[in-house]
Amino acid sequence: MASSQKEMPRVDMEKEFAKMSSSDQHFIKKMEKLNLDRAKTVKVMRGRNLLVGALLGSGAIAIYVYAMAAVKQETFLDFEEMPTEKK
């Protein structure tokens, strides 16, 4: 950084929090708790979404593999001899 640019001073949040009124402190603590609960819910939902995505993806791959194996086993179009036309 260039010396001509000024940096923003660090803020000690504990001192700033102590300066606030008790109602402000109460609402900040309440919002922090709500945000923590929301973050936990998002983490659980992310795990469930990954599980569902993995299950759907593996199901699609299994169906594709099964279809390819079923088509590979069909022999009704494989002729040992070409049929001849009768006149």
Image (tube, helix red, strand yellow):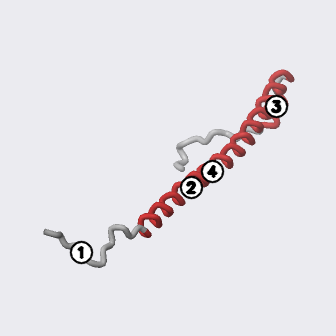
Distance in Å between CA atoms under marks 1 and 2: 40 Å
First along the sequence among labels 4 and 2:
4
**What kind of element bears circle 2?**
helix
Nearest-to-viewer mark from 4 and 2 = 2
Residue 75, x across and y down, in percent: 38, 70
The residue indicated by pointer 1 is 82
**What kind of element bears circle 3?**
helix
The residue indicated by pointer 2 is 59
The residue indicated by pointer 4 is 50
Amino acid of disc 4: Leu
Distance in Å between CA atoms under marks 4 and 1: 53 Å
Residue at position x 54%, y 42% from top? 5
Q: In the depicted view, which residue is nearer to us: 61 or 31?
A: 61
First along the sequence among labels 3 and 1:
3
Q: Is residue 14 left or right of residue 7?
A: right
First along the sequence among labels 3 and 4:
3
